[in-house]
Image (cartoon, rainbow, N blue to C red):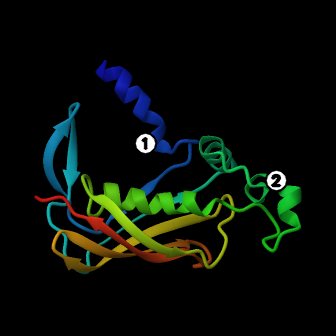
Amino acid sequence: MQEKFLEMLQPFKRGISGGVFQQRALTKPTFINSLLGHPVFQNLHIKVGDKAELSKAFTQNDVVTFSYLTGDTNPLHLNEEFAKKSRFGRTVVHGVLINGLISAVLGTKMPGQGCIFLSQEIRFPAPLYVGEEVTAAAEVKRLKGSVAHISVSCQVRESGKTVMEGMVKVMVPES
């Protein structure tokens, strides 16, 4: 049973479509437990100024899979001929898919496991194209009780172009 579960997790270790997640926590993790023989880390305390990030290049397969899972079949994401006639000139990655990287940073890096996403205010100032490596970053700006106010952004690594930015609120688990 344990081997079957670990086998199911393999695609997530390398990215659903074979892409590789490059994760870099800028905060110090603390060992808290083990899950199926593997150590689990969680940041037990966060403070204003804590940061975390991860990077990924979305593939066309990622976009198609997301469209299939959500039903969002907007041709701007899937049809090159349609997208060529748009202001973007080619297909673009779904904004919500990009935003998913922020969820990954918050849930796996900082604040980490057990946090609860409460709200977000985000904007998409530029498109992300398939194949562009994007870095999702988060920084704690304010703490109010168990709620962290976190500045988030996603930038294309090569050009520095910002494709998503905003603020989120998450409930931090009690340590």
Choose between 158 and 58: the one closer to the eye.
58
- In the picture as drawn, the residue positioned furthest to the left comes out as 175
Query: What residue appears at the point 18 percent right and 58 percent down from the top-left corner?
Result: 173
The reply to whether residue 23 is in sight is: no
Query: What residue appears at the point 59 percent right and 74 percent down from the top-left corner?
Result: 124
Residue for badge 1: 13
Residue 160 image-quadrant placement? bottom right
Query: What residue appears at the point 29 percent right and 22 percent down from the top-left corner?
Result: 2
- Determine whether the residue tagged by mark 1 lies in a helix, strand or loop: helix
Three-letter code for the amino acid on which mark 2 is drawn = Asn
**Left or right: 143 in relation to 3:** left
What number is the disc on residue 79?
2
Image coordinates for residue 158, horizontal then vertical, percent: 60, 73
Sequence order check: which comes first, mark 1 or mark 2? 1
The reply to whether residue 129 is in sight is: yes
Quarter the N terminus occupies: top left
Query: What residue appears at the point 14 percent right and 60 percent down from the top-left corner?
Result: 44
Three-letter code for the amino acid on which mark 1 is drawn = Lys
Foreground: disc 1 or disc 2: 2
**Left or right: 118 in relation to 146:** right
Image coordinates for residue 127, horizontal then vertical, percent: 67, 71
- In the picture as drawn, the residue positioned furthest to the top comes out as 1
